[in-house]
Image (cartoon, grey):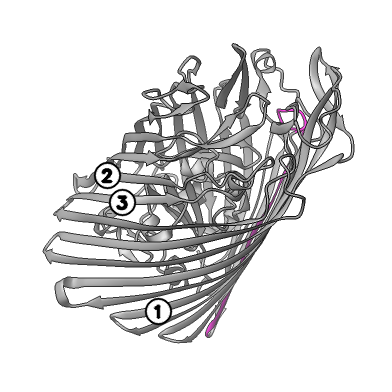
């Protein structure tokens, strides 16, 4: 597993971001859960190195992930986000987020904001698999997998402390410190971020995140690694701007009481043993305790037909809800790796079992309206009026996988993998099972075999790969057990993916390029459909097709200059989908840009040691805002400028984000009712200037 290599201090041993020498020898761990050269893996995988993390000084993960071709992480403010990897920009559960190879959340309780629960200060490097990886990682590993690999204890006393602040009210302090004494190593990583009086009214947030890791080397062959992470997050939930606010550049919020609270605790204890040069075993126990409590801005104003909402509603009254979705997890992960001299082959066997109790509570609220700055705003709400939903579930997840690879001749490697997953949702409704407040208690079962076949072929500094893989996602708990009924008719989402790609290194390894082309056919994708009564319901979307080309080039003409281009061109379409009597077949899916990418130029003058200057541009192209292709948004361009200077243990940096102060929306959407379109826009960051200082103690 990734945690194994992290504990052995070999995770992420990649070259710095501005160095491409030996790029073909880059080591990754997420591709097959073991340490392996990137060129031996028949997948599209990228690594964000520790040097890139250190020099970018990113306030959010999207500033890092969006440097990777085929990745578009959408900023929703205050570290909240959506994701797009081989899928439209989406809140759907088609992406898997890992920490040291272990999912940070349980299956069936997906949160599109899940990376809020990550501790950025603990990240050593980040690996991204693009495309289905269900044959090893199971459900939700469809569009992509993001694996944050945490730092291991340093060999001697070492650490860094830093502070930063921006002219838009953002403040942050980071600390990382650790040491190793004899067989025992320890490292602490954490940060506190705070936003006040930002560009949008009612947009404050604060977050504290800390990770504690303790490694004990029993002997040269055995390591016991333990870590715990705790995240406490709160954000005002100002929501999106309507067309009137957006057109007038009116940054005042439309709701003044909505919020999101996230509490996330997770711990893992792993014992790894290397039997000999050809055999190793790991056993990991995992525990999670998570809760997301929110008064969601996206629910304000909707008319709810249940609970107390049957009473007349006056023009100065709206509705909403307060909900709490919480779960705990107990899990065991086992893996054995066996190498053979025969055909230089390797067999990876693994299994996992999780037990996940979960609760969901939702209360109806009345909301008052008021006119603020000439516009209708939501200003207050009454105490919870009635219960909309109150249920608990017990989700069990069993998985087993096998991965076998071999080399029949020099330069060629063949990989075959197979995974079996079985899920059970034991649903208990704490309310009477009526058509108003939920369906009856029941049990739902889902299972799937997910295969993968692939090959790599390398000739000198040129390589090729191809693969076929399948992905599988069972419905989410909130999809199956809706507020008004049990949606047990929902089918699991299935994906069949075909992919080919390659890489090359030229000019004495100064130029490196990689590319991947994919075709992914989906069936029974689950999407949200707004019913005539205003309530959103989940439906299977028939058949879809996702096809695209991802490509990246890095070039270093000399010791001072570095150039990078990362981009993706794609089409996401409905093949067979009819909803509400409307046939969407042949139409493009909403929120699916045809193009997005980024480019960067970095200058490190040899005559001023420690100085770095970079300019980065990001482009998100035009896309349709609705599935009938009647409304579109033209996309946006953003330029970021970064400068830093390190002198001995001291460091200073200045980041100018959105340097040209472009006015844009990170995601724009439309809903149409009775022929009338209502637009909503997620305001992008206005120009901000961040200044930071750091001090490194220990060996430089």
- What residue is shown at x 39% (from left), y 63% (from top)? 420
Q: Quadrant of residue 380?
A: top right
Sooner in the amino-acid sequence: mark 3 or mark 1: 1
Q: Which mark is residue 281?
A: 1
Residue at x 47%, y 46% (from the top left corner) = 491
Q: Is residue 196 left or right of residue 595?
A: right
Secondary structure at badge 3 equals strand
In the rendered view, would you say 181 is above or below 62? Answer: below
Mark 3 vs mark 2, CA separation in Å: 7 Å
Picture coordinates of residue 87, whole percent (x, y): 43, 37
Q: Is residue 42 magenta?
A: no
**Magenta span: chief secondary structure:** strand
Mark 1 touching mark 2, by CB under 8 A?
no
- The residue identified by callout 3 is 469
Residue stretch rendered in magenta on the structure: 183-202
Judging by the rendered image, the residue that carries numbered circle 2 is 498
Ranked by sequence position, the earlier of labels 3 and 2 is 3
Residue displayed at 68% across by 26% down: 533
Alpha-carbon span between mark 1 and mark 2: 32 Å
């Amino acid at each position: 597993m990734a945690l194994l290599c992290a504990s052995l201090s070999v995770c992420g041993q990649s070259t710095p971001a501005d160095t491409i020498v030996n790029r073909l020898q880059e080591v990754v761990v997420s591709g097959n859960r073991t340490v392996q050269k990137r060129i031996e893996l028949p997948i599209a995988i990228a690594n964000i190195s520790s040097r890139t993390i250190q020099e970018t000084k990113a306030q959010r993960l999207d500033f890092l992930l969006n440097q990777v071709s085929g990745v578009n992480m959408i900023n929703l403010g205050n570290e909240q986000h959506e994701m797009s990897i081989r899928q439209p920009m989406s809140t759907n559960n088609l992406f898997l987020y890992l920490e040291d190879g272990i999912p940070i959340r349980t299956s069936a309780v997906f949160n599109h904001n899940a990376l809020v629960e990550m501790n950025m200060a603990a990240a050593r490097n980040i690996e991204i698999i693009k495309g289905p990886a269900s044959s090893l990682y199971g459900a939700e590993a469809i569009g992509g997998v993001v694996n944050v690999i945490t730092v291991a204890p340093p060999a001697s006393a070492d650490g860094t402390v830093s502070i930063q602040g921006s002219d838009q009210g953002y403040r942050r302090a980071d600390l990382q410190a650790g040491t190793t004494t004899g067989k025992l190593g320890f490292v602490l990583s954490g940060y506190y971020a705070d936003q006040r009086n930002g560009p949008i009214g009612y947009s404050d947030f604060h977050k504290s995140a800390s990770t504690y890791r303790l490694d004990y080397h029993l002997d040269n062959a055995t390591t016991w690694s333990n870590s715990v992470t705790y995240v406490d997050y709160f954000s005002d939930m100002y929501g999106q701007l309507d067309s009137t606010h957006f057109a007038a550049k009116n940054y005042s919020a439309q709701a003044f009481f909505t919020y999101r609270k996230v509490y996330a605790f997770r711990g893992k204890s792993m014992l790894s043993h290397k039997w000999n040069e050809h055999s190793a075993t790991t056993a990991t126990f995992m525990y999670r305790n998570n809760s997301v409590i929110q008064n969601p801005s996206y629910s304000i104003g909707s008319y709810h037909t249940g609970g107390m909402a049957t009473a007349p509603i006056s023009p100065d009254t709206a509705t909403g809800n307060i909900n709490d979705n919480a779960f705990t997890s107990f899990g065991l992960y086992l893996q054995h790796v066996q190498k053979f001299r025969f055909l230089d082959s390797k067999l990876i066997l693994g299994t996992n079992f999780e037990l996940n109790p979960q609760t969901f509570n939702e209360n109806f609220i009345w909301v008052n309206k008021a006119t603020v700055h000439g516009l209708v705003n939501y200003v207050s709400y009454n105490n919870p009026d009635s219960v909309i939903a109150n249920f608990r579930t017990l989700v069990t997840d069993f998985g087993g996988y096998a991965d076998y690879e071999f080399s029949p001749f020099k330069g060629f490697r063949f990989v075959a993998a197979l995974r079996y997953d079985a899920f059970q949702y034991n649903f208990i409704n704490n309310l009477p099972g009526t058509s108003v407040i939920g369906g009856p208690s029941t049990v739902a079962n889902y299972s799937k075999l997910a295969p993968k076949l692939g090959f790599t072929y390398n000739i000198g500094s040129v390589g090729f790969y191809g693969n076929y893989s399948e992905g599988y996602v069972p419905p989410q708990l909130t999809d199956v057990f809706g507020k008004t009924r049990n949606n047990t008719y929902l089918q699991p989402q299935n994906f069949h993916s075909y992919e080919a790609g390659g890489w090359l290194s030229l000019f004495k390894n100064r130029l490196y390029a990689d590319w991947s082309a994919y075709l992914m056919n989906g069936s029974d994708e689950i999407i949200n459909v707004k019913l005539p009564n205003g309530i959103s319901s989940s439906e299977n979307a028939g058949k879809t097709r996702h096809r695209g080309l991802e490509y990246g080039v890095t070039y270093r003409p000399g010791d001072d200059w570095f150039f990078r281009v990362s981009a993706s061109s794609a089409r996401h379409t409905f093949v067979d989908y009819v909803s509400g009597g409307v046939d969407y077949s042949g139409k493009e899916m909403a929120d699916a840009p045809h193009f997005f990418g980024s480019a960067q130029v970095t200058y490190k003058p040899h005559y001023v040691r420690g100085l770095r200057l970079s300019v980065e541009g990001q482009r998100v192209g035009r896309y349709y805002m609705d599935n009938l292709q009647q409304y579109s948004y033209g996309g946006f361009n953003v330029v970021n400028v970064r400068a830093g200077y390190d002198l001995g243990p001291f460091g200073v940096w200045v980041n100018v984000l959105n340097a040209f102060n472009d006015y844009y929306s990170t995601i724009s959407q439309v809903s149409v009712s009775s022929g009338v379109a209502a637009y909503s826009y997620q305001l992008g960051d206005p120009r901000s200037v961040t200044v930071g200082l750091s001090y490194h103690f220990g060996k430089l």
